Amino acid sequence: MIPEYYSIAQVADILGVSKETLRRWDKNGSLIPQRHPDNNYRVYHRSQIEHFEQVQLLFNSNWDAEFATEPIRPYTLIELFAGAGGLAIGMEQAGFESVLLNEIDKHACETLRTNRPHWNVIEGDIAQIDFTPYRDQVDMLSGGFPCQAFSYAGNKLGFEDTRGTLFFEFARAVKEVNPKIFLAENVRGLLKHDKGKTLETIKHVIDELGYDLVEPRILKAIFYQVPQKRERLLLVGIRKDIADHVTFSWPSPYKRILSLRDALKAGLLYESDVPLSAGQKYPKRKAQILSTVPEGGYWRDLPEDLQREYMKKSYFLEGGKTGMARRLAWDEPSLTLTCSPAQKQTERCHPDETRPLTVREYARIQTFPDDWVFSGPLTAQYKQIGNAVPVNLAHAVARSLVRLLNEIECLPAYNARTPALWKQMECVQLA
């Protein structure tokens, strides 16, 4: 059900603008909030914002239809840089069967094995793995290789020139496995990394490997049933012998933006309130200072003497530094989770209590299931969760990939592989 009214924070998130921008629009008369009839809060009625393209995507979303996506047959997957399994869970929910997952972090590997004993988890350096036994046996390869600079000897680098980087290992796996499609995910910073040279090299190598790259896109997690302002860059590659015959479509957004309340309280995402779990603690003086920050506030909401004490030399530097001394708000999405909720540059303080978010609160904001257990010491658990792809975002993208593979299965070249009548029935049903 589409809400009638939207808060200033919600509209800022949907439109991808700051609250300050909305305040300017209010002053110049281009978009003026009204009073909510029940609580007198300043809000926007849906009719005021429905002309924006981003809002139309929400109001006219195909989310429900896409959510019903089912694979024609079980599709197989190799996942690299698997971490704690955020991407893998989303793929599993969409119907993919993982045949190999590689991760170098021992605690993350233990997390994967604990939760999915049947998964083939290969712990260790990806450079030591031979992928050739899987050639032409796997439908898709996925993973989030770390963003690294290349050493530029010439104007355009090829596959061999990227040796020594983890992108090279990802590309080598694609070359050896020869999957129909691949998915690579990364931070949005990859777009401009090394003045855009890194991404251009990646595009060139993908072409050299025999794949057409769908134009890379930054997906905002808040649009995919994730109560968190996280952004990921997604790259989808389709093998060239297939690419001209199919079309990939990015997932439609969910019909509303979810908040921290949706993550931590019983409701749409979870049937119960967040379970109790371990969490980091603030030092005494830090807790005293943060206790004076209001819900949704940050260091600029402190009295000036406390601002100076807390920020020290940073007080005199330019920039908003809005992550410092930050207390989250119940009715807004969480800020992007980091690897440590108590770190001074990137605090993620509970909205009511003066403490960092707990492990299970962290996991819920990343939309992990409550029964997904994280292994290792507390710092390792936070790191695993903070580095993960949000499960619901992964699931949405995975459904789009399933639809792509369903379309591939229905190509005449692939119809011959299975009984014609069965294939015909499935493809007609798909259409």
Image (cartoon, rainbow, N blue to C red):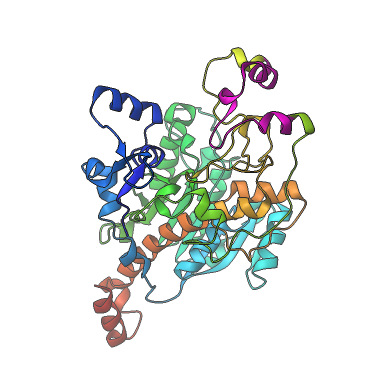
Task: Judge from the rendering whether residue 254 lies leftward or rightward of residue 163; answer left or right.
Answer: left
Which sits in the foreground, 64 or 90? 64
Q: Nearer the viewer, residue 42 or 394?
A: 42
Nearer-the-camera pick, 385 or 35: 35
Residue 24 point in image, percent of width and height: 32, 24
Tally of numbered tags: 0
Can you say which quadrant of the picture contains the N terminus?
A: bottom left
User: Residue 343 occupies which quadrant of the picture?
Assistant: top right
Residue 389 visible somewhere in the drawing:
yes
Residue at x 49%, y 63% (from the top left corner):
91
* Residue range corresponding to the magenta coloring: 286-312
Measured as percent of width and height from the top left, residue 259 is found at 48, 49
Give the percent coordinates (x, y) of residue 386.
61, 46
State which quarter of the image contains the C terminus. Answer: bottom left
Asked whether 331 or 417 is in front, the reply is 331
In the displayed structure, does residue 164 sit left or right of residue 403? right
Residue 293 in magenta stretch: yes
Q: Is residue 375 magenta?
A: no
| For residue 414, side relative to residue 317 (left or right) | left
Q: Main secondary structure of the magenta part?
A: helix
| On screen, residue 415 above or below 164 | below
Q: Residue at x 42, y 32 (%)?
A: 156
Residue 428 screen position, x and y as percent? 24, 78
Q: Compared with residue 187, is residue 318 higher up or lower down, i.e. above or below?
A: above
Residue at 53% from the left image edge and 15% from the top image edge: 318
| Res 83 seen here | no
Residue in the image at 57% along x and 59% along y: 368
